[in-house]
Amino acid sequence: QVQLVESGGGLVQAGGSLRLSCAVSGSTSSISTMTWYRQAPGKQRELVATISTGGTTNYADSVKGRFTISRDNAKNSVYLQMNSLKPEDTAVYYCNARLVTLYSANNYWGQGTQVTVSS
């Protein structure tokens, strides 16, 4: 059974920083792309940043230059460094891991961690 556990959320003032972590346990040998999503109240879940196994990254335009995604394959973990936070970054942040084998490809989600940015 694959499990994703996020940590690092909290309350921060605008302009501050937070670092989110996500650790994957279980069948980790087939982890492929890892992605952070977020969902604000009343809004759809949106992609924030994604990183491939080789380290290629992509970001939503709204976070480019402020957020940095990284991963540690040895620890089966992905991180999101969030700087210059804005009130509009307030959301529940979810970690997603895509596991790919010869026979299947599945996405797994963490439980989410709340990030609140006060003005």
Image (cartoon, grey):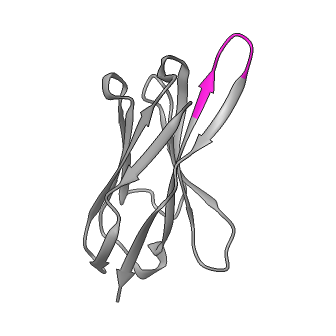
Q: Is residue 30 above or below residue 9?
A: above
Residue 59 visible to the viewer:
no
The C terminus sits in image quarter: bottom left
Residue 70 visible to the viewer:
yes
Q: Is residue 102 magenta?
A: yes
Give 69 or 66, whichever is nearer the viewer.
69
Residue 107: percent from left, percent from top: 65, 37
Residue 11: percent from left, percent from top: 31, 77
The N terminus sits in image quarter: top right
Residue farthest toward the top in the current orientation of the protein: 102
Which residue is rendered at x = 54% and y = 19% of the image? 30
Residue 23: percent from left, percent from top: 39, 39
Q: Quadrant of residue 115?
A: bottom left
Give 100 or 48, whichever is nearer the viewer.
100
Which residue is rendered at x = 50% and y = 38% of the image? 3
Residue farthest toward the bottom in the current orientation of the protein: 119
> Which residues are the magenta region?
98-104
Residue 21: percent from left, percent from top: 34, 48
Q: Is residue 96 magenta?
A: no
Q: Quick check: 45 left or right of 49?
A: right
